[in-house]
Amino acid sequence: MTSIYENSINAELLADIVSVSKSTLLKWEKSGKIKPFTCISGKKQYRIDQLTEFKEIRDMLNSNWDSEIQIKPVRKFSSIELFAGAGGLAIGLEKAGFEAVALNEFDKHACNTLRENRPEWNVIEGDIQNVDFTTFKGIDFISGGFPCQAFSYAGNQLGFEDTRGTLFFEFARVIKESQPKVFLGENVRGLLEHDNGRTIEVIKSVISGLGYTLIEPRVLKAIFYKVPQKRERLMLVGIRNDLLKYAKFQWPSPYKRVYVLKDALKGGELYPNDVPESIGQKYPKRKAEILKLVPQGGYWRNLPDDLQREYMQGSYFLGGGKTGMTRRLAWDEPSLTLTCSPAQKQTERCHPEESRPLTVREYARIQTFPDDWNFSGPISSQYKQIGNAVPVNLAFAVGRSLIALLNSIELKTKVEKDNCVSSIENKIEQMSLFANAYANL
């Protein structure tokens, strides 16, 4: 665990926090913008009191996390989750206070995972296209991570019907049929640039046409929300227009610490004990021999040249860093983004000390699943379910902000017009937060 309140932070974490490369840090050092020192272990460190010019550092030092963690729903808020997967988003939203009345998922193994862990949940297994959601009209909240797909452009202005055939269309259809007060869509950050930005513009247009105002989408970095992983997710929050005058929303504040791999796999603040033993994939003999030579935090370029050529083969001569290949994680850094398989050549996630892929339970810890959450299906499916999930703690943090939003709507405290929505750009101004307005009710 690395605390932002401790005296210093290492270069790897600073680069992750302020979203720059290590080469940029070196440039800043040369210009005098930041001043490193070498600690007893020989690693480069930076004093926190010399980094307060960075907004991310200031936000962590002055975080409202402790007050936001106290947010509770003023009543039971019902929810539907689409594309539910193994339940990462659902668990986090449940912890925040939502009560799921239905969860839809196509994959049979993921459905079995949901049923095994939450027998009381109404898991609707099957293709979303075949599910009628009109029976859920008046639901409080809908969430889901629809896949990123391009649209067919027949004209300049696309509407709801023009997106038919995509899973976003199904997401929008459920909103249209059930008319929730608020919805959450989550996706990869690449959606913002997908198809040269046209995809997100169509999504905004369709949501507006359905009678909802979309808060300006934001990419959230999981490391700021008690997740020991370098994972980013794009969040889209929509509010039904007739409720907009009551709506108060603010994105969650960052936690005051950045968790690293050691926090996930060893007992401490994040988990009370070491990660339980579990099944896991294995490397072929030669691959394991080569990975033994890769240091913590290293990858194929840390190998001797002859082994680089042997392992990389034709890719050795191609451009690009290919930093995911023969990649060994480090104890004192957040994990790289987990993929659907830790043993594939392009996306290896090797244990920091042992020459093997991460196990299923290690994968789950990095995604902040509870240890008693079991995964169904063959091992390949279990890795896939975990790798595709929204980190539970990230979902919990976003869920608290959404509960606060629904609380403000429920209490019907009218928002001043100047602090509401620009009718031209259809965006919400960020407003003062949450429970303070009703804490004494």
Image: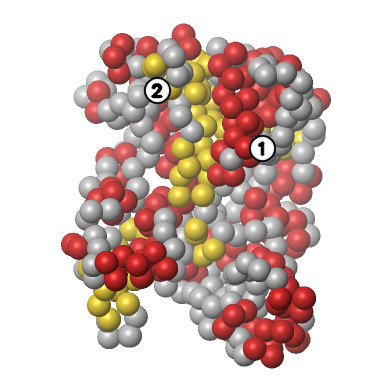
Label placed on residue 195 = 1
Query: Looking at the image, which is closer to me, 252 or 50?
Result: 50
Q: Earlier in the sequence, mark 2 or mark 1?
A: 1
Where is residue 339 drawn, in percent x and y? 65, 59
**Three-letter residue code for mark 1:** Asp
SS class of the residue under badge 1? helix
**Residue drawn at point x = 46 percent, y = 45 percent:** 220
Q: Residues within 10 Å of mark 2 (few under 14, many from 20)?
A: many
Q: Residue furthest top?
A: 242
Q: Is residue 438 above or below residue 111?
A: above
Where is residue 397 drawn, in percent x and y? 42, 42
**Residue drawn at point x = 77 percent, y = 39 percent:** 106
Q: Is residue 348 above or below residue 377?
A: below
**Three-letter residue code for mark 2:** Ile
Q: Is residue 149 above or below residue 280?
A: above
Is residue 92 something one can see in this rendering? no
* Residue located beneath label 2 in the image: 428
Q: Quadrant of residue 154?
A: top right
Determine whether, in the image, residue 188 is placed left or right of residue 424.
Answer: right
Q: Residues within 10 Å of mark 1 (few under 14, many from 20)?
A: few
Query: Looking at the image, which is closer to me, 196 or 259?
Result: 196
Is residue 320 something one can see in this rendering? yes
Quarter of the image with the N terminus in it = bottom left
